[in-house]
Image: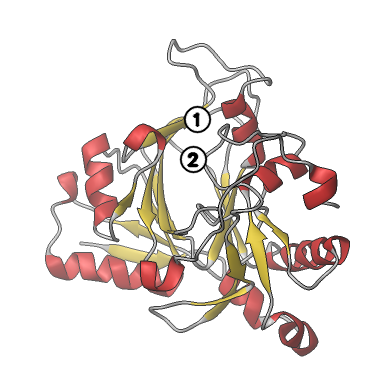
Amino acid sequence: MLEITPLDCTLGARVTGMPPGLQLSGAEWQEIEDAFHRHAALVFPALHLSDDEHIAFAEHFGAIEFLRDGQKVVRISNLRPDGTVMNSKEKRYQTLRGNEGWHTDSSYMPLAAKASALAAEIVPERGGETELADMRNAWDTLDDETREQIEGLSAYHSLYASQAKAGFVFKTGDGYGYHTRGAPLRPLVKVHPMTGRRSLFIGRHAFRIPGMEDGDAQALLDRLLEHACSPPRVYTHRWQPGDLMIWDNRCVLHRAGAYDYTTPRVMRHVRVAGDPEHDLVSTGRDERADGFAPTAAAPG
């Protein structure tokens, strides 16, 4: 029998009692989906899914977003294919370090992600946690003056901008995402299509607000992020192999915890694509061919 227990946080619930092979009835899957919308994140301890089961699980929440090389499932890992550990000059290593900043998945793509389902395969002895932050409560607890200020504002989202702010300059084609000219423009306040709740839609990929000086825009985004990613809105998951966690990218930010990068960490990731009616924005032509210039487009 399924047991769904809220976490000690403004978001999230722990789900236990899952049967082997995900042999759930339609009513039980509906119970899980309802809990997902209510809590915005679900933790399934010691589920130990195979790749195919992981994909099948995520497909109950929507169509899968194809990631690296057209795959539905990818390993987020600091290991090379031969099992050796990456070094700090490799782009994938730099992406892992960038992921230590608060973000929502695929906001830098035309179609932002609906959900992310992450499972642990190999975890370090210390560090490497995943943190979640509740953007619904972040909006609910904003002061009226700030709400009025940001209600009609939007920000561009760019993987190149966020990596540059983290000290890693990518060139066009180095990363999965759009560059500055083609960067998606998204409102700072998002209305959830299922619950109707407002939430902040920010994170490290947000970097410029039309109509504002870049320095002022970054200061506002930083202030919102500091407010949003503070207790009691933050849940820290300390992984054990076999754990699975799914969260709603439309109202939750997440980040990876730092760890000793000379030790292996292997996570398996399946991403649920957003709904074109609510999560798709138009993008301009991506004309930049040179490296992203952080002083020009991502000050602060």
- Disc 2 crowd rating (10 Å Cα; few below 14, some 14-19, many 20+) is many
Q: Picture coordinates of residue 52 (x, y %)?
A: 22, 39
The quadrant of the rendering that contains the N terminus is bottom left
Identify which amino acid the numbered label 1 is placed on.
Val
Q: Element under label 2?
A: loop
Q: Residue at x 53, y 43 (%)?
A: 238
- Disc 1 crowd rating (10 Å Cα; few below 14, some 14-19, many 20+) is some
Q: Picture coordinates of residue 248 (x, y %)?
A: 45, 62
Q: Along the line of sight, which residue is nearer the eye, 205 or 291?
A: 291
Question: Which residue position is annotated with label 2?
Answer: 239
Q: Is residue 145 above or below residue 7?
A: below
Q: Picture coordinates of residue 59 (x, y %)?
A: 25, 54
Q: Along the line of sight, which residue is nearer the eye, 175 or 247?
A: 175
Locate residue 93: give its quadrant: top right
Locate residue 54: give its quadrant: top left
Q: Picture coordinates of residue 226 (x, y %)?
A: 76, 63
Identify which amino acid the numbered label 2 is placed on.
Trp
Question: Which residue position is annotated with label 1?
Answer: 123
Q: Element under label 1?
A: loop
